[in-house]
Image (spheres, helix red, strand yellow):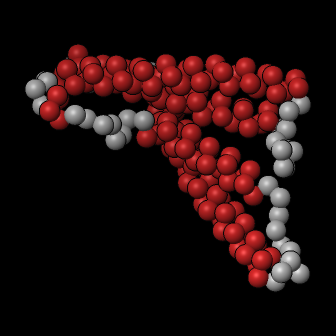
Amino acid sequence: MSRFASIVDAISRVMLLVSGFMITAMMLVVLAEVSTRALFGLTDGSLDLTFNGGIEIARFALLFAILYALPCNVDRSQVVVDLFTNTLSDRSIAVLQSICFIGYGLLALAMSYRFWGSVGHSYGSGETTQDLNIPMFYIYAATLVGTGMLCLRSGLVAVRRIREAIGITS
């Protein structure tokens, strides 16, 4: 399992890089969209550099920025209520964290199941995005990759926490 876990961790780190690229792309698209619209307004329409699909690109970039960052960061930044956890042992905290990660994994599994259905439906129907006519099949498939990795990574982190709770270190 250690080899499998390290492969999943490596893929999650690559997905985090993709997430960073998506945030940058979203920022550049929004900047271009606002700039070209302002230029259009300032020239009373004589200079039209506006483009179709900017909002669509920003929307999907935001989706993938968030979704592809989650697998790598699922084990970080948990909200902890110190008043409650200060009285618990480290072992109890690890068990509690395991339960949370199992919950994340189940949520990601349910999302993956729904996106799997959406992949099949959109492939069969030929559904496309409104402005750019990108087949939704690709969007749903990329989303399925993100939710699937979130499910795997959450499960692996839960197993790690359970192993910590029962004292298995290797």
Q: Residue furthest top?
A: 166
Is residue 78 visible to us here? yes
Q: In this view, does 11 lie to the left or right of 79?
A: right
Question: Above or below — where is 136 with respect to 115?
Answer: below
Looking at the image, is 121 positioned above or below residue 141?
A: above
Seen at 72% across and 54% down, the residue is: 55
Q: Residue at x 64, y 58 (%)?
A: 26
- Give the image quarter of residue 127: top right
Expressed as whole percent of the image width and height from the top left, the position of residue 69 reads 51, 43
Above or below, 92 relative to 12: above
> In screen coordinates, is 88 left or right of 2?
left
Q: In which quarter of the image is residue 85?
A: top left
Name the image quarter holding the N terminus: top left
Number of marks drawn? 0
Q: Where is residue 12 in the image (x, y as percent from the top left)?
A: 52, 39
User: Can see residue 168?
Assistant: no
Q: Residue at x 82, y 68 (%)?
A: 50
- In the depicted view, which residue is nearer to us: 92 or 131? 131
Query: What residue is drawn where x is 30% and y is 37%?
Result: 79
Q: Which of 11 and 104 is in front in this view?
A: 104
Residue 4 x/y as whole percent: 49, 26
* Quadrant into which the C terminus falls: top left
Query: To which quarter of the image does residue 122 belong?
Result: top right
Drawn side of residue 69 relative to residue 116, left or right: left
Is residue 20 found left or right of 59 in the rendered image? left
Residue 124, image x and y in percent? 87, 23
The residue sitting at the bottom extreme is 43
